[in-house]
Image (cartoon, coloured by chain):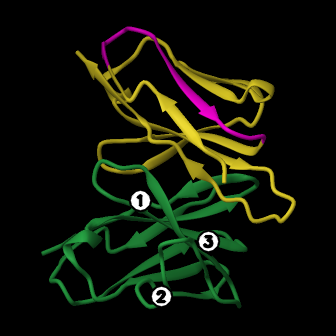
Chain colours: A yellow, B green
């Protein structure tokens, strides 16, 4: 199955700073999503982005499918951005049995 | 998007007992997914539940330990059987809706 790697594993930033999180995947993808898991454990959808660029407020994401990576940008960080960010990818299969595979996550801590 | 609820939100159970987790979705969906998140780890898919057929389990997970029911298109249950402290995790229900995957709030299980 597809392999998904995220970097950095941990990131500590001052409030107001910008950050870039990276997700590398090992194969072509049907589906790539970014999630934020808040301190209470809830997983929140950020982006569905198998290719291209999307923006939502202070967050944006870019997936370069041909080079097998995706980036999540967070600008003007706020303490509420703290938590774990997961990238998840679903590879392309001739058998239709691919599943969403999660990366190991990036733990972001924003200091006031 | 899909709105997913889970019950219970958390529980503390004794080893050797079983717990059934309920997942309710506000829309009819073909597939429902059950994930486990061990402390400090990423998400691992346990099984995929289709209405009207047996659940499909991922490598390392078996029906005797994690029986699943899927009686209709909006509801599923996961039972964690004969629990041990290693089963202490967050268990999450998920659905795919228009190519995007959405997650319930999770059930935080502690086994003593």
Give the side of residue B64 with respect to residue B87, left or right. right
Q: Nearer the viewer, mark 2 or mark 3?
A: 2
Q: Earlier in the sequence, mark 3 or mark 1?
A: 3
- Seen in the picture, residue A102 relative to A84 is either above or below; the reply is below
In 3D space, how far apart are the residues under numbered discs 2 and 3 (Cα atoms)? 14 Å
Q: Nearer the viewer, mark 2 or mark 1?
A: 2
Q: How many numbered marks appear? A: 3
Give residue A14's position: percent from left, percent from top. 29, 11
For the residue pair A108 and A81, the one nearer the viewer reads as A108
Residue B48 percent location from the top left of the image: 61, 73
Location of residue B97 (image quadrant): bottom right
Nearer the observer, B82 or B23: B82
Residue B51 in the image, given as x and y percentages of width and height: 69, 85
Chain under disc 3: B
Instruction: Name the residue rendered at 34%, 87% in the picture.
Output: B81
Q: Which residues are magenta?
A: A12-28
Question: Disc 1 marks which residue?
Answer: B105
SS under mark 3: strand
Asked whether residue B4 is drawn in magenta, I would say: no
Q: Tell me the SS state at disc 1.
A: loop
Quarter the C terminus of chain B occupies? bottom left
Q: Which residue is mark 3?
A: B32
For residue B112, above or below residue A68: below
Of labels 2 and 1, earlier in sequence is: 2
Measure the C-alpha gap from mark 3 to mark 1: 14 Å
Residue B103 picture location, percent across and down = 52, 57
């Amino acid at each position: 199955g597809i392999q998904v790697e995220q970097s950095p594993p941990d990131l500590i930033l001052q409030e107001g700073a910008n950050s870039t999180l990276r997700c590398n995947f090992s194969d072509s993808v049907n589906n790539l999503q970014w999630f934020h898991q808040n301190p209470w454990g809830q997983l929140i959808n950020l982006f569905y982005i198998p290719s291209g660029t999307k923006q939502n407020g202070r967050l944006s994401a870019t997936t370069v499918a041909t080079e097998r990576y995706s980036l999540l940008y967070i600008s003007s960080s706020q303490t509420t951005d703290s938590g774990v960010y997961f990238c998840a990818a679903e590879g392309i299969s001739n058998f239709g049995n691919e599943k969403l595979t999660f990366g190991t996550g990036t733990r972001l801590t924003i200091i006031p | 998007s899909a709105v997913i609820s889970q019950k219970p939100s958390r529980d503390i159970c004794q080893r050797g007992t079983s717990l059934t987790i309920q997942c309710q979705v506000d829309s009819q969906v073909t597939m429902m997914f059950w994930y486990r998140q061990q402390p400090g780890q990423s998400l691992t898919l346990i099984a995929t539940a289709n209405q009207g057929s047996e659940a499909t389990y991922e490598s390392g997970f078996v029906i005797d330990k994690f029986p699943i029911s899927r009686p209709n298109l909006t509801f599923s249950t996961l039972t964690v059987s004969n629990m041990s402290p290693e089963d202490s995790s967050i268990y999450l229900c998920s659905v795919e809706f228009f190519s995007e995957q959405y997650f319930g709030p999770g059930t935080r299980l502690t086994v003593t």
